[in-house]
C-alpha cells in the first residue's frame, strides 16, 4: 500500500488546490502521487480478487 506520508501529501495538495491554483510543480507532483496511489489500489484489489474462491454446492 502507499506510504502514509505520500497519502498525506495527496490530501495536502487537494486542500491547497481548493484555496488557490496549484503551481506547475505541484500539479506534476500531484499527478505522480495519484498514479502511484492508483497503481497500489489496483494491485491490492487484484490481489483480493485473486484470493476469491467460488464453490458450487448441489
Image (cartoon, grey):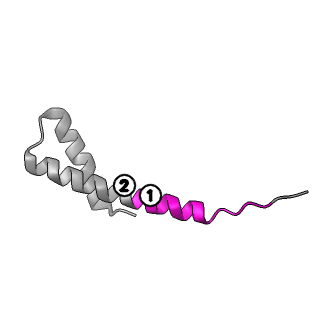
Q: Which residue is mark 1?
A: 42
Crowding around mark 1 (Cα neighbors within 10 Å: few <14, some 14 to 19, many 20+) is few
Q: Is residue 44 visible?
A: yes
Q: Residue at x 58, y 60 (%)?
A: 49
Which secondary structure class fits the magenta region best?
A: helix
Q: Give, as a single range, the part of the protein colored magenta.
A: 40-55
**Real-space Cα separation, disc 1 to disc 2, in angstroms:** 6 Å
Q: Secondary structure at mark 2?
A: helix
> In which quadrant of the rendered image does the N terminus lie?
bottom left
In this picture, is 28 found above or below 19? below
Q: Are marks 1 and 2 in contact (CB under 8 Å)?
A: yes
Q: Which residue is mark 2?
A: 38
The spot of residue 26 in percent (x, y) is: 13, 49
Q: Residue 7's quadrant in the figure?
A: bottom left
Q: Residue at x 18, y 38 (%)?
A: 17
Q: Is residue 8 visible?
A: no
The residue nearer to you, when weighing 5 against 23, is: 23
> In which quadrant of the rendered image does the C terminus lie?
bottom right
Q: Residue at x 31, y 59 (%)?
A: 36
The residue nearer to you, when weighing 23 against 8, is: 23
The spot of residue 25 in percent (x, y) is: 9, 51
Q: Residue at x 51, y 61 (%)?
A: 46
The residue nearer to you, when weighing 58 against 48, is: 58
The residue nearer to you, when weighing 34 against 3, is: 34
Amino acid at each position: 500500500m502507499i506510504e502514509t506520508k505520500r497519502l498525506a501529501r495527496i490530501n495536502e495538495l487537494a486542500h491547497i488546490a481548493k484555496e488557490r491554483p496549484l503551481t506547475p510543480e505541484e500539479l506534476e507532483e500531484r499527478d505522480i502521487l495519484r498514479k502511484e496511489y492508483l497503481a497500489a489500489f489496483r494491485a491490492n484489489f487484484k490481489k483480493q480478487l485473486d484470493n476469491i474462491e467460488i464453490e458450487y454446492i448441489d
